[in-house]
Amino acid sequence: MKKHNFSAGPCVLPQEVILKSAEAIQDFNNSGLSLIEISHRSKDFVAVMDRARALALELLGLENKGYKALFLHGGASLQFLMTAYNLLETKAGYLNTGTWSDNAIKEAKLFGEVLEVGSSKSEGYNHIPKMYGVPNDLDYLHLTSNNTIYGTQIKNFPKVNVPLVCDMSSDIFSRQLDFSKFDLIYAGAQKNMGPAGTTLVVVKESVLGNVSRKIPSMMDYQAHILKESMFNTPAVFPVYVSMLTLEWLKNSGGIPAIEEVNNKKAQLLYSEIDLNPLFNGYSIKEDRSTMNATFNLTESKLQATFDAMWKEAGINGLSGHRSIGGYRASMYNALSLESVGILVDVMSELERKA
Ligand code: PMP
């Protein structure tokens, strides 16, 4: 039986995408060859890369606006330093909203001065700082749109006069935003796009080429743009699965349609967390993420019972991140409303039993 997969990433992918990927591993485009044994320079794979890059820009509404999409190696973690390598000349601002922002700050400090414009670290990252200033002399401001571990999400992005860089690893393609407000967006594939192994970078070309340092080719966005994301051998399988997932999203009505489902899923689960006296939400209400809902049991003695119940219901991946414990229900694009319904049933059943 297929599990209800609430894993934080790698995570649930659309079933049709998994089936098509499996087919391509056996025989890609009826070529008599597997996707993973053909040249990345072959006509068939170049078409996959081009389609994946075009779909990313199309879904974000960034076609013909001076942006380029790249599929790179190294995960979002490499982008923590690559963004600074390419954009940080003197000073950059960072909003510290979680472990991943904190890691991005550490890497950026290797390249220049870092101003932490706001931080919720001392409160366990249970909210997004709101009242912070952004000086006009920054090379850029770096934000993390969704904090996967803590279950917080930026709802209103600041209006700034400096380039905006955003780690959207755990909520890209999940909600409508004016993506043209951002100068550089990056996201590891392994949440809303595909398997781990490739990272989407969407960058406005006009912000590049402005730092004085020499940039090694593999770290240089301009080198990757010039080679159309084929500077070296790309991660062919993750890029192919990402292309299929983006196609699935487009055919399902794009971001507006998936956002509606995502909001329904989040409303269903958060209303159970709020109404059921056995559960407490972790994030403050106004900053709650629609992708990752974090919560705790109010009575720890019920943990073994609850854990046995959700596992019995076919639910996978509900344990919180090892750094904060508790529970985390990740509800990425491919998770169905029905799966959230199953979890909510288990939670209310626990209340009846307790
Ligand atoms: N940023 C965010 C918001 C994340 O959730 C993660 C991983 N879960 C990362 C960065 C790091 O990604 P990667 O493992 O691809 O380096």
Image (tube, grey):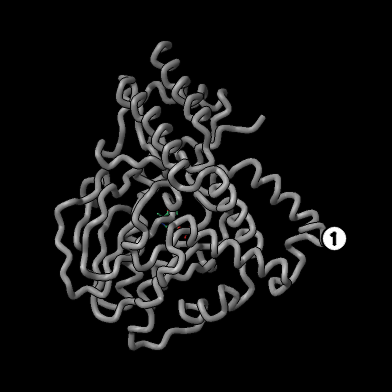
Residue 32 located left or right of residue 198: right
Residue 104 located left or right of residue 96: right
Categorize mark 1 by other alpha carbons within 10 Å: few (<14), some (14-19), many (20+).
Answer: few
Residue denoted by label 1: 32
Image quadrant in which the N terminus is located = top right
Q: Could you say which quadrant of the image residue 185 lies in?
A: bottom left
Of residue 212 and residue 229, the one placed in the foreground of this image is: 229
Type of amino acid under label 1: Gly
Cβ of mark 1 under 8 Å from ligand 1: the answer is no
Of residue 89 and residue 108, the one placed in the foreground of this image is: 89
Please give the name of the residue rendered at 43% of the width and 51% of the height, measured from the top-left corner.
170
- Residue 213 versus residue 255 in the image, above or below: below
Pinpoint residue 296: horizontal percent, then vertical percent: 35, 31
Q: Secondary structure at mark 1?
A: loop
Q: Could you say which quadrant of the image residue 235 lies in?
A: bottom right
Please give the name of the residue rendered at 61% of the width and 66% of the height, measured from the top-left corner.
49
